[in-house]
Image: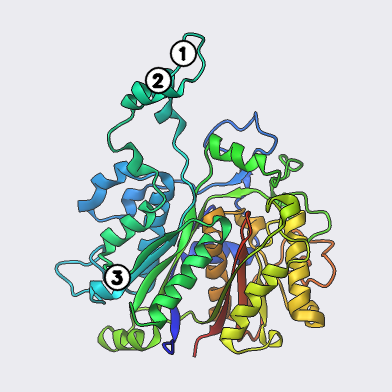
Amino acid sequence: MSRRVVITGLGPVSGLGMGVDANWQRVLAGEGAIGRVRAFDPSGFACQLCAEVEDFNVKDFVPKSYRKATKVMARDIGLAVAAADLAARDAGLVTRGNADNGEATSYDPTRMGAHIGAGLIVAEIDELTAALAEATDDQGRFDYHKWGSEGQGHLTPLWLLKYLPNMLACHVTIIHDTQGPSNTITCGEASAMLSMGESMRVIQRGAADLCFCGGVESKINPTAFLRKHMTGQLNTDNNETPDKAVRPFCQTAAGGVIGEGGGIAILESLETYEARQARQPGSGRVYAEVLGFGASQSVNAAKRNLEPDPEGRSIASAIRAALREAQIDPSAIDLIIPFGAGVPAGDQAEAAALRTVFGDGLAKTPARSIKPLVGTCNAGAGGLDVFVAAKTLFEQTIPPAVNCEQPLDGVDAATAESRKAKLNHALVYSVGVGGQNAALVLKKAG
């Protein structure tokens, strides 16, 4: 596995906006997207906040010949298709999805892959209503037998194609004609970064030269919203002050907020990227090099893995694995983009893991979470975090720290403005509910 892997395109989609510039400018300004839910009436929920993607139409991001297919795209799928289109254009790639007038594509389709993290897509309530109404007994109670014999007949024939998690990668691969290795990872909040690790390995071993990777998810749906409430991880105290709701690594943290979106990145072999540049001068740039990847599984039997191990041992294990592959010491890390969802138990476990890995050096290493701005985008969270990590290295700018007036011991996360800095290496990691962890070490390009 000697091939070097670089990030050449970024496609963030979030409540902050669509694409690199819209998201980066608002991140630098510390300007958040969290507000009251607009997609449905949230008044029956204890937490009424989220960070929604506004004014989105997937038809703006697909070729005209593919617009009929958007009828069977759930919102998660549409956002992933948009993120992939943005990433490809940002990288200067010519694919079947954006080629004009027979223009030659940048890569042989068999040398392109796709690995995209997804959540368990929740069906739209309006689509289920008629079917559920026909699946009740004489007392008006739901009847599984009638659901099978009568209820399901009221769903459209292609209904299931809107809600299979693998359809995010499926549509991306069809649109961009990526015929190389493809996979879908559904491991909660760690999905996007695990997918990036998979793409890294595929490129390293020569099975592909380029991969679309990352993750996207939308839980702005009453059913999904209820499920997240049932985890007990949402903030129910700041409905009137949404900009203060998410307080990562702060002693006053009171829970997270659901976000919508994520990010797709373009990973390429450095050698084939350089060859592409020779053929197509000025097409794209290298944001950062991916030096190391690590993954692990936490176990906290006492809490049935609804909360991480309070000592953060497996989080530390994933970070150490990424550092080991990168062949650098923790002291070489100049910036940490943590998960930092503002959930007290999760933040404290992360802080414990970081103290274990970095020791006294942690207090000198800035940790910057963007969850106060975009919420937690679940399977897409790591895609946005990698976008920020890569962009900070490229711009040599540390983003602001938001909503942390009383930081946890030893963590450099106190509220601060953005600033220029010399940045060579960044650590970014994800921590999923259920225990999956993933970490990447990125290096400044050049």
Q: Quadrant of residue 403?
A: bottom right
Q: Where is residue 263 in the image (x, y as percent from the top left)?
A: 48, 62
Give the amino acid at mark 1. Answer: Asp
Instruction: State the residue position of label 3.
Output: 180
| Element type at mark 3 | loop
Instruction: State the residue position of label 1.
Output: 137
Q: In which quarter of the image is residue 204?
A: bottom left
Give the amino acid at mark 3. Answer: Gly
CB contact under 8 Å: marks 2 and 1: yes
| Element type at mark 2 | helix
The residue drawn where x is 65% and y is 48% is: 257
Q: Is residue 138 visible?
A: yes
Tag of residue 146: 2
Q: Where is residue 239 in the image (x, y as percent from the top left)?
A: 71, 40
Q: Distance between the residues labelled 2 and 3?
A: 43 Å
Q: Where is residue 185 in the image (x, y as percent from the top left)?
A: 46, 59
Instruction: Say which of marks 3 and 1 sits in front.
Output: 1
For marks 3 and 1, the one nearer the N-term is 1
